[in-house]
Image (cartoon, rainbow, N blue to C red):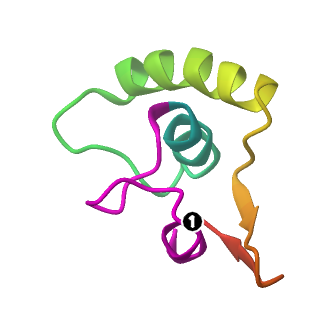
């Protein structure tokens, strides 16, 4: 996430776009989830967004301009 922010690929609050976020969240779903929404509902919403995001070239990891590979 730091690499994305450093390269200007996040909004002013430091969040990536929804499709990139879906790819990252789906990849890390086993350790990061929203507390108030049932897990099955979260997964059902993340999978289509993550598939579309991957089709558009987003990955769960990001290699910044400086060549530093960072996992989000």
Q: Which range is magenta?
A: 1-18
Q: Is residue 39 above or below residue 2?
A: above
Residue depicted at 16% across the width and 36% down the height: 36
Residue depicted at 28% across the width and 26% down the height: 38
Measuring from the top left, give residue 50's x and y in whole percent.
63, 28
Q: Secondary structure at mark 1?
A: helix
- How many numbered tags mark residues here? 1
Q: Is residue 53 above or below residue 62?
A: above
Residue depicted at 64% across the width and 46% down the height: 27
Q: Nearer the viewer, residue 62 or 39?
A: 62
Residue depicted at 39% across the width and 26% down the height: 42
Q: Main secondary structure of the magenta part?
A: loop
Q: Nearer the viewer, residue 8 or 18?
A: 8
Which quarter of the figure is the C terminus placed in? bottom right
Measuring from the top left, give residue 8's x and y in whole percent.
51, 64
- Specify whether 12 is left or right of 52: left
Measuring from the top left, give residue 23's x and y in whole percent.
62, 39
Q: Is residue 53 above or below residue 24?
A: above
- Specify whether 66 is left or right of 34: right
The residue under label 1 is 4
């Amino acid at each position: 996430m730091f690499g994305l922010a450093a390269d200007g690929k996040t909004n002013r609050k430091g969040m990536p776009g929804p499709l990139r976020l879906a790819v990252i969240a789906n990849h890390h779903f086993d350790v990061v989830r929203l507390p108030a929404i049932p897990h099955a509902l979260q997964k059902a919403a993340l999978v289509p967004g993550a598939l579309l995001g991957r089709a558009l070239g987003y990955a769960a990891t990001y290699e910044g301009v400086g060549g530093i590979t960072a996992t989000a």
